[in-house]
Amino acid sequence: MKPRTFYAFAGITAAAVVAAAIAVSTQSDTISLTAGTEPAFPKLANAVNDVAKIEIKNAKGSFSITRDGDNWGMDQKEGYRVEFEKVKSAIVNLSQFKLIEKKTSDPDRYGRLEVDTPNSPESKGRDITLKDAEGNLLAAAVIGKLNPNLFGSGGAGTYIRREGDEASWLARGQVELGEEPNNWMVRQIVNYGQEKIKRTVIIHPDGKQFAIFKASEKDKNFVLENIPQGRKMKNPDEANPLGGVMWRMMFDDVKKSRQAGMAGQALDRILHGLGWFYREDRNGKNRRRLLGQILGDNRRRCNRRG
């Protein structure tokens, strides 16, 4: 080989090394792995429509969701309705988990992957169990650390440890489980902005009451009824917060009517013919319950499940 040719090749090689170094230095943290083909939960993969119970445990506590016909309810809240789309998403996403790489079997190292059993307040693992109507196990595992961009555009990766298997695994897929019942239940009671409220009456437990109103739907501010002569509201918009109590109203807790133990109530008359009765707990905490009734020809109770 001529020296000139050798030097030319040497120059090309050096350039390639520099380019490779630059490529490595700018590389992202994504892992380039081929998609797994083995389902993490084979029984579940073939029986997504058979799931009838979901049990979840984490550092905050445990709760379960049970199917009743076409509906799903929270067991710890006497079957109060949960959001079907969240249940569907959890079941389908778990059924699509694919095993990618076997990880540690050392219990002392589970915590690093967040697949330790959630038996302490420090644990970050989330234990989930899915069963059919007869109680047969379809899937059970501790769901651990999630990296939503582990595979780049190829999807997320989640560390899991399946029941009966000491080994933890990296699996392709992700699932949202929620930390507590409120993350699953249909919590919105009513959602009406101030523009739809005509009159609000506040009735205290001792029977005393006052009301605010709008003479027209186009009015910007609520006005206090029966203002004593010579007195006026401090600010024109002072009463507006009371007129907006129906905006995105959500409960913090829920019980059946026979257990609610409530006193005090307020009646809101809504411009479009909808009346709502709002009652507050005796203990004064921020736990509210709304009992609704459509006014007009089609009367119905809005709290059928509670």
Image (tube, rainbow, N blue to C red):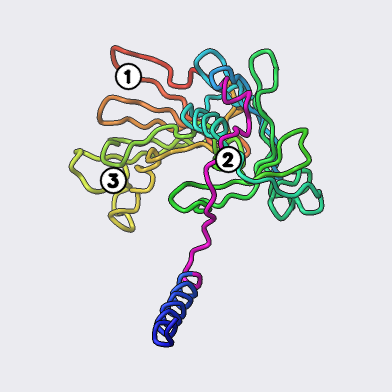
Quadrant of the frame with the N terminus: bottom left
Establish if 102 lies above or below 199: below
| Left or right: 159 as drawn, with respect to 233 | right
Image position, residue 93 (x, y; %): 52, 34
Residue, far bottom:
3
Per the image, the residue denoted by label 2 is 178
Secondary structure under the numbered disc 3 in the rendered image: strand
Per the image, the residue denoted by label 3 is 223
Can you see residue 147?
A: yes
Q: Which residue is drawn at 28% across and 12% down?
A: 297
If you read the primary sequence from the N terminus, does the residue marked by circle 1 or circle 2 appear first?
2
The span picked out in magenta is 24-47
Image position, residue 174 (x, y; %): 54, 42
* Magenta stretch: dominant secondary structure: loop
Quadrant of the frame with the C terminus: top right
Per the image, the residue denoted by label 1 is 295
Residue type of the residue flagged with mark 2: Gly
Q: How far apart are marks 1 and 2 (CA)?
A: 37 Å
Is mark 1 in CB contact (under 8 Å) with mark 2? no
Residue 94 is one of the magenta-drawn residues: no
Residue type of the residue flagged with mark 1: Leu
Residue type of the residue flagged with mark 3: Val
If you read the primary sequence from the N terminus, does the residue marked by circle 3 or circle 2 appear first?
2
